[in-house]
Amino acid sequence: QQQVKQSPQSLIVQKGGISIINCAYENTAFDYFPWYQQFPGKGPALLIAIRPDVSEKKEGRFTISFNKSAKQFSLHIMDSQPGDSATYFCAASPAGGFKTIFGAGTRLFVKA
Amino acid sequence: NAGVTQTPKFQVLKTGQSMTLQCAQDMNHNSMYWYRQDPGMGLRLIYYSASEGTTDKGEVPNGYNVSRLNKREFSLRLESAAPSQTSVYFCASSETSGYTDTQYFGPGTRLTVL
């Protein structure tokens, strides 16, 4: 069973719009929540990450919102650009590290 | 600085054949990982090595073995390949546990088992 549930599977957004990807987890042992971006034919690369002691983290056009009580977190991409077209994975790591669990991924397409 | 390199890039095997996927990193990282990526499943951890000389099972270790040859290299071996092992395999490394430090991924090996 998937410990980190990610939605939607795919997303089409107009250039300049907001892309929103949601994730939910069950295991309260998770203590670190990174998001990875993957372009076709490449390995994933860290985009942004958050600890549960903050409710929001912003880096440029990318923002993570975190709701600890609901065990949900989301990625918002503001002013989406065609260059943002990629697959995005949310993930969760336990406090001890090593065993990071990834969501199933969201394929984002930004229309010019 | 090449980061994480993987060989080969592509491989086709017949059921029952064996092969070893190679991974090397030049960032002096302590920890290394092997993941498989399947459509609709995200990335799943096969094995990891917290430091040179140690290896541990991840989420989906059955059918695989690993060797941490030295600090730089971490190999993944399929002893008797099965069609269910058709996947894209990624190696990654991190400075420590990957808990709050970044995992750096290689470009992947696309494996098809017929």
Image: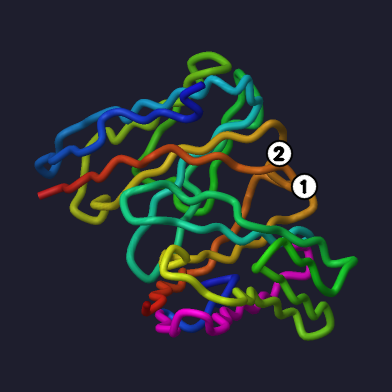
Q: Which residue is mark 1?
A: A96
To the question of a shared chain for discs 1 and 2, the answer is: no
Q: Is residue A83 left or right of residue A41?
A: right
Protein chain holding label 2: B
Amino acid carrying label 2: it is: Ser
Q: Secondary structure at mark 2?
A: loop
Seen from the viewer's position, the closer of residues B60 and B35 is: B35
Q: 10 Å neighbourhood of mark 1: few (<14), some, or many (≥20)?
A: some
The residue at which mark 2 appears reads as B97
Q: Amino acid at mark 1?
A: Gly
Stretch in magenta: A10-30
Can you give x and y, in whole percent of width and height, for residue B6 in the image? 36, 30
Name the image quarter holding residue A79: bottom right
Are the two marked residues, 1 and 2, in contact with CB atoms closer than 8 angstroms? yes
Asked whether, in this view, residue B79 is left or right of residue B93, the answer is left
How crowded pointer 2 is (Cα within 10 Å; few <14, some 14-19, many 20+) is rated as many
